[in-house]
Image: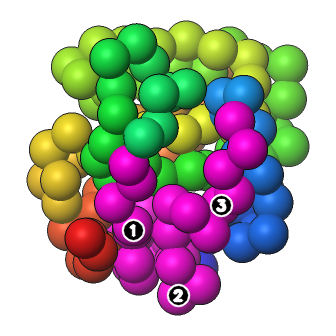
Amino acid sequence: MIGSDVASVPEQGQTLTAVETTKKISDFVGEDIFVNTNGEVFGTIKKVKNFTEFAKGEKEGYYFPITLGADYTGKEITCKGMETKETKSNDLNWIVKLSKGKDSTFTFSADEMPDLTLTFKHATLEE
């Protein structure tokens, strides 16, 4: 598995903090979820319905929560792959929408940090 110094999937009982919502991590992913050292995601990603807090007009889809490691603290983080846009933030808690399903790819980068690329080909998308 990927080291928590790089990134981790939040615990099942936690409330998602990347956006203001009452949804828990368990609403997004199964207990079997993990990311290996190559950034490949394995396990169950659940289909979320009525998730209007993510973005205007968004209602359902597959979303993946990730917390970047402490080494990213205070750095501007760039995420490429979000609907072909580039998003920047200093927040360590992220949620990405798998708009291309299992073909989705997201790359996180920050100064003085190696890129972290997440892929989902090995994940199970649950209806």
Amino acid at the residue labelled 3? Ile
**Residue at mark 3 to residue at mark 2: CA–CA distance:** 12 Å
> On screen, 6 above or below 79?
below
Callout 3 environment at 10 Å: few (<14), some (14 to 19), or many (20+)? many
Residue bounds of the magenta highlight? 21-49
In this image, 76 relative to 123: left or right? right
Query: Is residue 118 at least partly visible in the picture?
Result: no
> On screen, 81 above or below 34?
above
> At 64% across and 14% down in the image, what residue appears?
89
Front residue of 74/18: it is 18
The C terminus lies in which quarter of the figure?
bottom left
Tag of residue 45: 1
Tag of residue 25: 3
**Residue at mark 1 to residue at mark 3: CA–CA distance:** 10 Å
> At 69% across and 36% down in the image, what residue appears?
21
Query: Is residue 116 at least partly visible in the picture?
Result: yes
| Residue 50: % across, % down | 42, 41
In this image, 81 relative to 42: left or right? left
Q: Does the magenta stretch include residue 23?
A: yes
> Which mark is first along the chain, 2 or 3?
3
Q: Name the residue under label 2.
A: 32
At numbered mark 3, what does the secondary structure look like: helix, strand or loop? helix
Front residue of 48/106: it is 48
Amino acid at the residue labelled 1? Ile
Callout 2 environment at 10 Å: few (<14), some (14 to 19), or many (20+)? few
